[in-house]
Amino acid sequence: MLTSIITVCYNSEKTIERTMESVLSQTVPPYEYIIIDGKSTDGTLDRIEAMRSRFSEKGIRLILTSEEDEGIYDAMNKGIDKASGDIIGIINSDDYYEPEAVEVMEDTFAKTGCDLAFADIRMHMTSGVTFIKKARVRKYTTSRDWNHPTQFVSAEIYKKYRFKCRDISDDMDLYFRIKRAGYKIVAVNRVLANFTMGGVSSRIPLSQVKERIMRRYRIYRENGYSRAYIFECVAFELIKFILS
């Protein structure tokens, strides 16, 4: 089984090395590492190139593209287009994997025959406090159980489903569409990635809370869930606002 890892970045010179180190440190190296850069103007590209030889030594193909894009999910779609692995993981440049992430996910796909898998994640608040967000798959669907930085998807599924490039909740929408279609999804109760709060998805001005609630609610409704999910959306966004 071959694994492709994708990282999208823009002006990430302060964090990109940590993300790349987490890919290099995998107990089972991925087949390839694809970095889609949004034409950074800082030292991001220099830092990536400085580590290229280490990927070569590990036998990991490093593919780097730097060009303007139409947002983070457009960049992710570009990365998926370039991927040649059997399964694909996406880790952003503010986040990083635990060393066994690829090994555990390859084993999970091989043993369960799943189409998509995700795991527990360690959340890092700007205050230095950390907590674990658990992964679960249950009949009552909620994004509170799902962790995108830990998600791996079969390449076959990505041939059918791509990010719509509408807004910052596109990853949630894609997960819901795959789940609604009845594909096999597995939750792994083991921390496989670390998420740094304070990025684009977790910086929430009070003026945007209502908009984010309605955007999240729209995704639930578009994917066939009841109007009662408005309460889920309100609670989720208020908690994110408080934590941010």
Image (spheres, grey):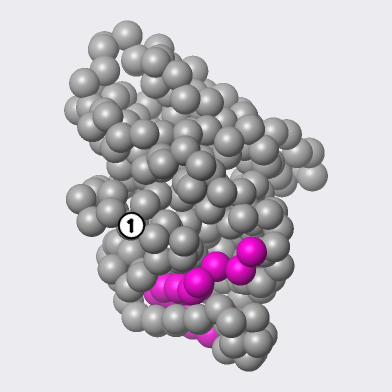
Residue 203 at x, y = what percent?
Answer: 53, 44
Residues drawn in magenta:
28-45
- 104 or 132, which is in the foreground? 104
Q: Position of residue 160 (x, y in %)?
A: 20, 50
Q: Nearer the viewer, residue 93 or 230?
A: 93
Q: Residue at x 61, y 49 (%)?
A: 104
Residue under label 1, please give it. 155
Q: Is residue 82 left or right of residue 3?
A: left
| On screen, residue 103 above or below 207 | below
Q: Residue at x 40, y 15 (%)?
A: 140
**Side (left or right) of 5 relative to 15:** left
Expressed as whole percent of the image width and height from the top left, the position of residue 64 reads 44, 82
Residue 165 visible in the current orientation? no
Quarter holding residue 234: top left
User: Quick one: label 1, few (<14), some, or many (20+) residues within 10 Å?
Assistant: many
**Residue 98 seen by the camera:** yes
Q: Amino acid at mark 1?
A: Ala
Q: Is residue 58 above or below residue 151?
A: below
Rendered view: 169 above or below 223: below
Residue 124 image-quadrant placement: top right
Residue plotted at (71% across, 67% down): 25
Query: Residue 38 colored magenta?
Result: yes
Q: Is residue 180 magenta?
A: no
Residue 106 x %, y %: 53, 53
Q: Is residue 77 left or right of 208 when viewed as pictured?
A: left
Total numbered labels placed on residues in the image: 1
